[in-house]
């Protein structure tokens, strides 16, 4: 259906429409600028908020939807993760025939690779979540620590890990094991988050409704509050607490046998108003503003020797 407006008027309105679409982005950018300024100017002040603040924040935010572990969601997530890797696949690189997944969870990402024709070995420290479909697909599943992978050196054409490295106690050791397990010329793809100091880095969506709980309140206060409310609280050791810079040092200081093919860092600036409101709490946890908004890392490496 053609517009009733004359072509000349539509032409005049087009720039205004484009500017209107930019307004939300400009507003969000300005919020981040203000939050950064408050963070950088923060002086000595309270490192933590009090329990009444916790109760007020909890009442101000709705709980986010539960992470979906249903059969359709896990299958779709597995396919999406494989597609995310393929979108970064180096030009000219051969398809992976042998794939090792580290921290496989229910194993449905491994299934996506298996259905594409690869021989797949999947591992996790906790095997109770392994999906029966993963077992029936021909994926080899095993309970293994990321720092001690039970595969021979150079077995894999490709090592992948999704949403796991922020949980591993020793990411450096895990990376070394991945490098040992992949053949020369093979690839390692690590995609993980949310990182600890980012908005949802606490990994406590079932008990704490608001972002940045780990930066605003001591863990023991959050745990006591959650249990008082009858909600499950995951122990602090569930995540390793690493900041983005510490992960970055892994790639920069990687053995000479590894080269970085691509590195992407996702950001979440949608809750910077809390940084602006309580800058001393955040400055007490880090000197780098980006630690608070860099939420996930996606790195592709190649073993060259």
Image (cartoon, rainbow, N blue to C red):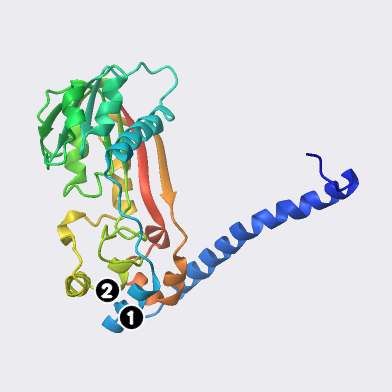
Label 1 neighbour load within 10 Å: few <14, some 14-19, many 20+: few
Dividing the image into 4 quarters, which one contains the C terminus? top left
| Rendering quarter of residue 104 | top left
Residue 180 can be seen in this image: no
Marker disc for residue 262: none
Name the residue tied to disc 2: 217
Looking at the image, which is closer to me, 64 or 240? 64
Residue at image x 35%, y 67%? Answer: 210
Residue 135 is left or right of residue 280, and the answer is: left
* Residue 188 percent coordinates (x, y): 29, 30
| Residue 183 or residue 109, whichever sits in front | 109
Q: Judge the density around disc 2: few (<14), some (14-19), many (≥20) Cα neighbours within 10 Å.
A: some
On screen, residue 261 above or below 65: above
Q: In the image, is residue 278 above or below residue 67?
A: below
Secondary structure beneath dot 1 equals: helix
Rendered view: 101 above or below 65: above
Task: Tell me, yes or no, whether the two marked residues, 1 and 2, touch with CB atoms within 8 Å.
Answer: yes
Report the residue marked by disc 1: 53
Expressed as whole percent of the image width and height from the top left, the position of residue 249 reads 30, 46
Which residue is drawn at the image coordinates 23% and 73% (left, top)?
218
Image check: 291 left or right of 12?
Answer: left
Single out the residue that lies furthest toward the front.
Answer: 1
Mark 1 and mark 2 lie on one chain; the one further toward the N terminus is: 1
Distance between mark 1 and mark 2 Cα atoms: 9 Å
Q: Secondary structure at mark 2?
A: loop
Q: Answer left or right for 29 relative to 177.
A: right
Name the residue rendered at 25%, 65% in the picture: 207
């Amino acid at each position: 259906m053609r517009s009733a407006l004359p072509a000349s008027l539509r032409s005049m309105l087009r720039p205004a429409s484009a500017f209107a679409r930019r307004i939300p982005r400009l507003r969000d950018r300005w919020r981040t600028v203000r939050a950064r300024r408050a963070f950088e100017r923060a002086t000595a002040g309270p490192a933590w908020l009090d329990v009444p603040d916790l109760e007020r924040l909890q009442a101000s935010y709705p709980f986010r939807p539960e992470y979906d572990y249903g059969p359709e969601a896990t299958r779709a997530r597995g396919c999406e993760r494989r597609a995310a890797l393929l979108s970064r696949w180096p030009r000219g690189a051969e398809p992976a025939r042998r794939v090792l997944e580290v921290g496989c969870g229910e194993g449905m990402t491994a299934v996506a690779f298996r259905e594409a024709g690869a021989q797949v070995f999947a591992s996790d420290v906790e095997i109770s979540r392994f999906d029966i479909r993963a077992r029936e697909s021909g994926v080899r599943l095993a309970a293994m620590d990321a720092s001690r992978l039970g595969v021979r050196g150079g077995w894999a054409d490709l090592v992948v890990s999704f949403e796991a490295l922020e949980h591993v106690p020793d990411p450096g050791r895990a990376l070394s094991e991945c490098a040992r397990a992949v053949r020369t010329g093979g690839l390692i793809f690590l995609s993980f988050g949310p990182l600890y100091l980012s908005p949802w880095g606490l990994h406590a969506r079932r008990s704490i409704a608001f972002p940045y709980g780990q930066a605003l309140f001591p863990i023991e206060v959050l745990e006591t509050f959650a249990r008082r409310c009858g909600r499950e609280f995951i122990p602090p050791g569930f995540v390793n607490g690493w900041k983005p810079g510490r992960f970055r040092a892994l790639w920069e200081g990687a053995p000479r046998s590894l080269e970085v093919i691509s590195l992407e860092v996702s950001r979440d600036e949608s809750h910077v108003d809390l940084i602006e409101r309580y800058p001393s709490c955040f400055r007490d946890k880090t000197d780098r503003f980006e630690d608070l908004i860099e939420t996930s890392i996606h790195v592709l490496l190649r073993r060259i020797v």
